[in-house]
DNA sequence: GTATCATTTTATAATCATTATAAATACCTA
DNA sequence: TAGGTATTTATAATGATTATAAAATGATAC
């Protein structure tokens, strides 16, 4: 556990981010919980153990992580901004019944289009929606 | 032009939507301008010729179009909901410099992942970001 | 160790997109 | 034309995000 915190500190330092307690805890939350939390979920969970935590800090920190490419934004829904510490290219599937967001692999090469040959691409997002197997079976 | 309006009316009727003046104009806007407008862009443009138009009507109508699959939501950015009357599967590229949103073809088969074989997929979105050729050349 | 300055966090207010509500208008049918 | 329904409008309420300034923390110099 201490080792893990040490790792988190290293991750932050590599990006030239001062490892404040708040930043470590928010990064830890994203890395441990891989459930693509909203800002409010992060805040509500962390404020339990850090009573003085401010929403503004969560917003600021997530924005900092995003700019430093420590986290990516998942805008699969237009009314909730979610965050993901897994920054490699992968797809997201949201179940419209239970709300769970699943990761799935995406073949980057297959995604290539000639129409974009003169475009400089810096970010790729693949979002699917539908019903997950669990909800699908339950509803039958 | 009258013919076109007639087409729009037909499109609405096929979806069992009563073709009110507002609905026709909003659909026309989406079909003619293929630039993935935000709600506010639609409202600000249309209110010029329809001074009594209400933002609520634009919101309601777009939501109706979405539910009827006459339009799709483009949530490429977390702070702006855009709409698109082209509902077939295709990708969107947003230039982070000029803000233009480009369409590009997506090979649906290539997007398939075994990990989703038990999922019921109802919606597929592919969003890229980066710099468009125009901005790329200008900046050099 | 203390003073000083910069960074980070916090509390709070402001903004802005969206949604909710209820009244007004338009539309339809008898 | 009257009465009922659907749609639009104006307005208020909500809720997420951003802005601001003060407080707290951390680093540096003496
Ligand atoms: Mn993910
Ligand atoms: Mn499009
Ligand atoms: Zn589900
Ligand atoms: Zn551009």
Image (cartoon, coloured by chain):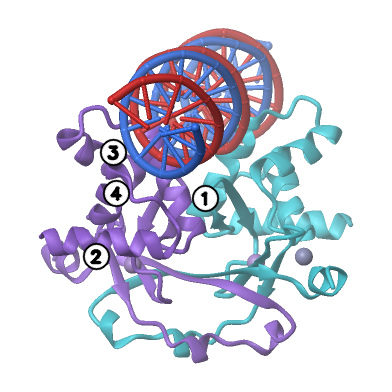
Chain colours: A purple, B cyan, C red, D blue
Marks 2 and 3 sit apart, C-alpha to C-alpha, by: 22 Å
Marks 1 and 2 sit apart, C-alpha to C-alpha, by: 30 Å
Residue B16 — which label? Answer: none
Residue B78 — which label? Answer: 1
Marks 4 and 1 sit apart, C-alpha to C-alpha, by: 20 Å
Residue B111 placement, left or right of A118: left
Question: Which residue is label 2 attached to?
Answer: A7
- The chain identifier of the residue carrying mark 2 reads A
Helix, strand or loop under label 2: helix
Marks 1 and 3 sit apart, C-alpha to C-alpha, by: 19 Å
The mark that comes first in sequence, 4 or 3, is 4
Question: Which residue is label 4 attached to?
Answer: A26
Helix, strand or loop under label 4: helix
Q: Is residue A85 visible?
A: yes
- The chain identifier of the residue carrying mark 3 reads A
- The chain identifier of the residue carrying mark 1 reads B
Marks 4 and 3 sit apart, C-alpha to C-alpha, by: 9 Å
The image quarter containing residue A90 is bottom left
Same chain for the residues at labels 2 and 3, yes or no? yes
Residue B9 placement, left or right of A53: right
Front of the two marks 1 and 3:
3
Helix, strand or loop under label 3: helix
Marks 4 and 2 sit apart, C-alpha to C-alpha, by: 14 Å
Question: Which residue is label 3 attached to?
Answer: A43
Image quarter for ligand 2: bottom right
- Residue at the image position 35 percent from the left and 43 percent from the top: A39
- Residue at the image position 68 percent from the left and 77 percent from the top: A120
Same chain for the residues at labels 4 and 1, yes or no? no
Front of the two marks 4 and 2:
2
Assess whether mark 3 and mark 1 are in contact (beta carbons under 8 angstroms). Answer: no
């Amino acid at each position: 556990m201490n080792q893990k915190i040490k790792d988190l500190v290293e991750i932050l330092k590599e990006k030239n981010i001062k490892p404040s307690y708040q930043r470590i805890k928010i990064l830890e939350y994203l890395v441990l919980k891989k459930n693509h939390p909203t800002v409010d979920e992060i805040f509500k969970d962390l404020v339990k153990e850090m009573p003085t935590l401010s929403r503004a800090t969560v917003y600021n920190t997530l924005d900092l992580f995003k700019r430093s490419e420590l986290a990516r934004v998942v805008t699969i829904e237009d009314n909730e901004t979610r965050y993901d510490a897994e920054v490699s290219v992968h797809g997201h599937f949201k179940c419209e019944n239970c709300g769970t967001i699943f990761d799935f692999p995406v073949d980057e090469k297959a995604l290539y289009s000639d129409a974009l040959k003169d475009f400089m691409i810096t970010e790729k997002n693949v979002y699917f929606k539908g019903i997950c197997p669990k909800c699908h079976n339950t509803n039958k």
